[in-house]
C-alpha cells in the first residue's frame, strides 16, 4: 500500500497468495475440536475486539455432557452462523463487506455511497449536472428564438463534448469518493478534487480512445447501410441484411466497451497509464464477461427507470407550458410540429427535471462501475486482505479500526 489514494497493481499477472485468507477446501472444524496454535486472532468471523474463546476439551463420545450454554461465543450463546455451518462473517468497515460481492451487494453499495456521503456525492453531481443543463438549455433557448437557423443542430452537436467532459470529471471524482467509502473513511469535496485532479488529463485521453474504438467499430459495420441510404435505392430485400449488419456492429461495439469498462478505475486508483489501464481491464474482465454484462445492463435499466420517474412530473409540466407549440399547428402536420422548439418556460421545466435526475443517477452509476472493479480484484487478487489492512483492522495487521490510531495510515 502507498501513502497516496489508489490501489497499487499486483507485481505479476497471477493472483498473489495471501496467507490470511482461509482456503475454500479446508476441512471445517468439528464441535469441541481444538484448533492449532495461532499467532494472530482469526481473520474471519467473530466480533472484533472480543477476547479469544477458551479452548474446549476434546469431545468424548458416549460420555454424558453437562448441560449449559455453548462456550464458542465468549460465554454467550451466538445465534449466527457457526464455523461448521454457513458462511463466515466478513469485515465491513465501509459500504461493502470485504469479500466477493453479489449483484445485490454491488447495487446496495452504490446506494450506500450516495446515502452516507451525500454531501460530497451530490455536491459533485449537482455541480456537473447544473453546468450541463445550463449550457444545453441556453442553446435550445437560442434556437427557439431563431427557428429557421442551424442552431438546433449546433445545440445537439454541442452537447457531445459537454457530456464527455462532465462524464470524465464525474468519473474521476466519484471514483476517488468510492475508494474512500469502501474503507469507511470520511471524505470532503476538496479532498476528492485534490486526489482526482492529477488524473483528469489521462482520464480524458482514455475516454476519447475508448469512444473512438467503439464508434469506429459501429461505423465500419453501418457504412454499407449508410452508403446504400445515400444512394437512394432502398428496397426491403437489400436493406434487411444491411440493418442486421449494423445491429451486429452495435452489439460488437457494446461488447468491446464492456471489456474496457474497468480501465477508468484502474487508471485512477492504480495510477496507471492509458495502455496499462486498458490491459488491466481486459485481464480483470476475463472469465466474468457475461456477469459484468448482466450487471451493466441491470444497472443501466434501474438508473434509466429512476431518471424517467423523476422526470415525469417535469415533462408533464413542460407539455402544459408548451400548449399548442409542442405539436405545432394543425395545418403544418404532425411531423412538422415535432420540429418546433419548446418555449423557454417548458425548457426550464425539462432542465430542472434533468438536473434532479442527473444529480441522483450520476454518482450511483459511477459507484457501480468502481465496485465491479473492486469485486473483480477481490476475486482474482485477494484485494480484500489489503483493504482490511488499509482500513486499520487489527486482525489483519492494521493499527486500529479505520486507522484512527495512525494518522499516516495508507489511504485508498
Image (cartoon, helix red, strand yellow):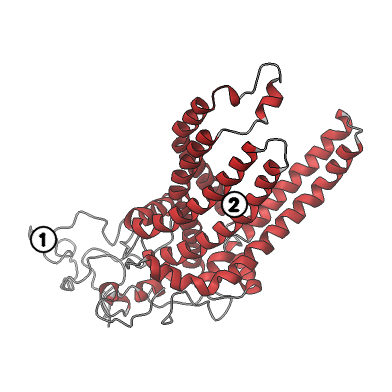
Which picture quadrant has residue 392? bottom left
Q: Which mark is residue 65?
A: 1
Q: In screen coordinates, is 126 left or right of 134?
A: left
Element class at badge 1: loop
Relative image position of residue 181 (x, y in whole percent): 37, 64
Seen from this angle, which residue lies furthest front?
145
* Label 2 secondary element: helix
Q: Where is residue 156? Give x, y as percent.
A: 66, 45
Residue receiving disc 2? 290
Quick one: label 2 or label 1, which is nearer the N terminus? 1
Q: Is residue 23 visible?
A: no
Residue 376 shows in this picture: yes
| Left or right: 225, with 259 as reference point | right
In the image, residue 31 sits, relative to residue 248, either above or below, namely below
Picture coordinates of residue 51, whole percent (x, y): 16, 73
The answer to which of 37 and 197 lies nearer the viewer is 197
Seen from the viewer's position, the closer of residues 62 and 393 is 393
Q: Nearer the viewer, mark 2 or mark 1?
A: 2
Residue at 34% over, 53% down: 115
Q: How many numbered marks have been drawn onto this rendered protein structure?
A: 2
Q: Quadrant of the N terminus?
A: bottom left
Relative horizontal placement of residue 94, taking residue 287 as reference (left or right): left
Rendered position, 210 above or below 266: above
Amino acid at each position: 500500500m502507498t501513502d497516496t489514494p489508489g490501489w497499487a497493481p499486483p507485481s505479476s499477472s497471477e493472483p498473489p497468495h495471501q496467507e490470511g485468507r482461509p482456503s475454500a477446501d479446508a476441512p471445517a472444524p468439528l464441535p469441541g475440536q481444538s484448533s492449532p496454535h495461532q499467532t494472530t486472532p482469526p481473520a474471519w468471523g467473530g466480533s472484533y475486539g472480543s477476547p479469544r474463546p477458551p479452548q474446549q476439551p476434546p469431545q468424548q463420545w458416549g460420555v454424558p455432557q453437562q448441560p449449559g450454554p455453548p462456550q464458542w461465543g465468549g460465554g454467550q450463546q451466538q445465534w449466527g452462523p457457526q464455523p461448521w455451518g454457513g458462511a463466515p462473517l466478513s469485515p465491513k468497515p465501509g459500504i461493502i463487506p470485504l469479500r466477493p460481492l453479489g449483484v445485490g451487494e454491488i447495487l446496495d453499495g452504490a446506494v450506500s455511497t450516495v446515502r452516507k456521503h451525500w454531501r460530497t456525492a451530490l455536491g459533485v453531481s449537482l455541480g456537473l449536472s447544473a453546468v450541463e443543463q445550463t449550457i444545453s438549455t441556453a442553446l435550445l433557448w437560442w434556437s427557439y428564438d431563431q427557428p429557421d437557423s442551424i442552431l438546433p443542430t449546433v445545440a445537439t452537436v454541442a452537447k457531445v463534448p459537454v457530456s464527455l467532459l462532465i462524464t470524465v470529471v464525474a468519473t474521476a471524482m466519484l471514483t476517488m469518493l468510492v475508494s474512500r467509502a469502501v474503507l469507511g473513511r470520511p471524505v470532503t469535496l476538496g479532498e476528492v478534487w485534490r486526489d482526482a485532479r492529477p488524473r483528469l488529463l489521462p482520464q480524458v485521453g482514455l475516454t476519447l480512445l475508448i469512444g473512438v474504438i467503439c464508434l469506429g467499430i459501429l461505423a465500419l459495420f453501418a457504412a454499407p447501410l449508410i452508403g446504400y441510404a445515400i444512394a437512394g435505392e432502398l428496397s426491403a430485400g437489400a436493406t434487411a441484411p444491411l440493418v442486421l449488419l449494423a445491429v451486429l456492429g452495435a452489439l460488437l461495439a457494446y461488447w468491446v466497451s464492456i471489456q474496457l469498462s474497468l480501465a477508468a478505475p484502474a487508471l485512477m486508483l492504480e495510477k496507471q497509464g492509458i495502455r496499462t489501464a486498458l490491459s488491466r481491464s481486459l485481464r480483470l474482465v476475463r472469465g466474468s464477461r457475461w456477469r459484468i454484462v448482466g450487471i451493466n445492463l441491470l444497472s443501466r435499466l434501474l438508473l434509466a427507470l429512476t431518471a424517467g420517474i423523476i422526470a415525469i412530473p417535469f415533462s408533464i409540466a413542460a407539455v402544459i407550458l408548451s400548449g399548442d407549440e409542442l405539436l405545432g399547428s394543425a395545418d403544418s402536420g404532425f411531423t412538422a410540429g415535432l420540429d418546433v422548439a419548446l418555449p423557454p418556460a417548458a425548457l426550464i421545466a425539462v432542465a430542472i427535471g434533468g438536473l434532479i435526475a442527473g444529480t441522483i443517477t450520476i454518482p450511483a452509476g459511477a459507484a457501480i462501475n468502481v465496485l465491479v472493479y473492486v469485486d473483480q480484484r477481490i476475486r482474482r487478487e485477494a484485494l480484500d486482505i489489503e483493504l482490511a489492512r488499509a482500513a486499520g483492522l487489527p486482525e489483519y495487521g492494521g493499527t486500529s479500526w479505520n486507522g484512527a490510531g495512525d494518522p499516516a495510515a495508507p489511504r485508498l
